[in-house]
Amino acid sequence: MRRLLIGLVIAALAIGATLTGLALALESAWFAQFVARQASGRMDRQVTIAGPLAFDWALRPRLHIPTLTIANADWAGSEPLARIAGAQLTLDLARLLGGQLVIANLLLHAPQLDLQRLKDGRSNWQELLGGDSSGKPARVIVDTVRIRDGRLRLDDASQALLLDIAIETVAAGAGPELLHVAGRGSRRGHGFELDLRGGPLLAVTDPERPYPVAGTLRAGGTRLQGAGELLRPAAPARGAFTLTLQGPNPADLHQLLGLALPDLPPYRLTGRLLFEQGHWHFRDFDGRVGDSDLTGNLVIRPGRPLVLDAELASRQLDLDDLLPALGAAPASDVGETAAAGQRQQAQARRQAPDVLPEAPADRDRLLGVKARVRFRGERVAAPRQIPLQQVDFTLELADGVLRFQPLTFALGGGRVRSRLALDTRRQPVQGRLEAHIQDVDLSELLGGFGVPRGGFGTIRGRLDARFAGDSLAQAAASSDGGLLLYMTSGEIDAVLVSLAGLDAGRALMKRLFGSGPTRIECAFGHLEARDGLATLERFLIATEDIDLTAAGTVNLRQETFDIALRGYPRSPSVGASDAPVHLGGKFAAADVSVMSKELVARGALAALAALVAPPLAIAPFLNPGSGDEKEDVCSRLSREASRIELGSAPVDAAAAAGRRARRD
């Protein structure tokens, strides 16, 4: 018995000595360097441990690791990929006996990550985070991870993205701590702030369970706020979020997210954001842009080119909200929605002598983008109560060429069908606009300009223009083409618009046509433009009592016009004045003057004729004493206009017909 006890004591001492020696070995500098060498071989990166390891021995021993550094890729500079000021981990010995190394609790002190990705897509982390594709169970299992005072820096040249964010885990009741990320960054030089909260850190790598994410991203006045789930965030496979976007201008999203959106007033949209098969879907969104409501669906496919496909609709479209897309500011009167910068722009425009916007378009937004957008506006609020009832268009963008085909307006009971093409690859932008005007009610159209409602008559016509320019002002100043408008018959209380609201023009119309209803036998107007100078080739309004003719020029470069009008009484008994009228000045400050008989007698009419060359080009058509000949003129002009509208002859043919008639 004594020998047995002595043997047990010796065995216990031997085991104790062995365990003590093992403990001393595990806490030695040699063992720390051994671990570092093993980790370096597995990662193919230099791993450094600044000192020996330390253990708190228990049934669940705790290991203390000093400062640990993981070297960067050879091409990524001298700063390490990762540095951890210290770490603590608790080992599960019971599961270790089962053949698995289980870390029950891992705490990281001040971890710092320096992540980099080149333009060609290479990153300094892809080899380390690629995962084990062998299908074998992981040899190391980590139950929970906690982070204190972590930091991540990202320089992604492929996305022109910089990030400098703080990372930590925060307590969430009795469960594992949740990830919190907050900091600043920039994309293409435009700064932003983000604040995101996720689930447990280890759930980021779960290939089967979606990872919860919620938070906010801000860039200036632009804000994106969302909450949802994303499967495998490091390499997303699919996800679903509720997302709200709001800001002063949708175009600001171009620098932040790479989306080619137009300049528009402040907006707020809420919808479901889905990610699947490499595509982002913004579905069933609803909200407002300026004073217009907007609903629809948007699909985004990242890559080169970036592909956009959208179906949009508005129940009530405020046409003023589209002005920023043309380089102008939206309406900024009381009750109108506009950003602070847009209000300042509107104030500056009100003080400017010109009307057409001079702000150049940002063609860079359209490069590398392929898009198809279909839009329908059910009801339209237009300036001056212009009777627009509906707007429909399909926008297509490919290889830098932007097409609106078709671009359709419901106007005054009729319709304007048009096509617009812009080639942004050329300097300046080259474009063409074609439009057909069909059955526009004259009474409804003039009602928005203060002309009393009543009467009838429909307008038809055609526009064909080419232009070159990076702004609306430049495009107008270079335009070539023609505009034809005609009406076969009608009746209205006031034949013309009140000439920009001036009392002199209203008084003239009363003198020429009287104050009651006037029957219009035909009306015909034809403009031809060359290099921004438009000439009124022919103009005629033939009524039962008097005919009004006009001729002159509109200078789209200088935004000025000089037009002469003259009335021809149908019979000497009418008694209406035939004194000519001069309309002229800047678009922003029109002037109307009625020329007296004394001025006419002194030759002022001749001077005006020389100015507009000639001012009364339609006069050879007329024979005031013969109603039959007038009816023949109306019939001839109507047939000619119908041929032009149907495309059987170019708009220029109207000028040629006019010259032939004058020779006859």
Image (spheres, grey):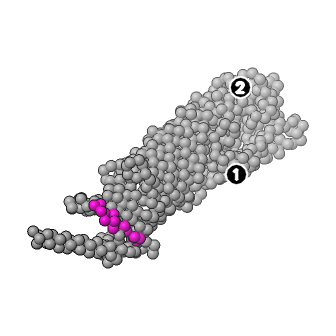
Which residues, given as a range, are shown in magenta? 55-70
Closest to the observer: 3 or 271?
3
Residue 609 is at least partly visible in this image? no
Closest to the observer: 299 or 405?
299
At label 1, the amino acid type is Arg
Q: Look at the image and tell me in which quarter the C terminus lies.
A: top right
Find out whether residue 80 is within the magenta segment.
no
Which residue is under mark 1?
Answer: 557
Residue visible at 63% across and 40% down in the picture:
337
Q: Look at the image and tell me in which quarter the N terminus lies.
A: bottom left
Q: Residue furthest top?
A: 516
Residue visible at 75% across and 21% down in the picture:
516
Q: Secondary structure at mark 1?
A: loop
Residue 209 is at least partly visible in this image? yes
At label 2, the amino acid type is Pro
Closest to the observer: 316 or 105?
105
User: Residue 454, how many percent across, how many down?
Assistant: 68, 23
Find out whether residue 57 is within the magenta segment.
yes
Going by the image, does 619 lie left or right of 427? right
User: Residue 589, how many percent across, how many down?
Assistant: 77, 43
Residue visible at 48% across and 49% down in the picture:
215
Q: Which mark is residue 452?
A: 2
Q: Which mark is residue 23?
A: none
Going by the image, does 580 lie left or right of 308? right
Mark 1 Cα within 10 Å, few/some/many (few <14, many 20+)?
A: some
Q: Secondary structure at mark 2?
A: loop
Question: Residue 122, located in which quarter of the rendered image?
Answer: bottom left
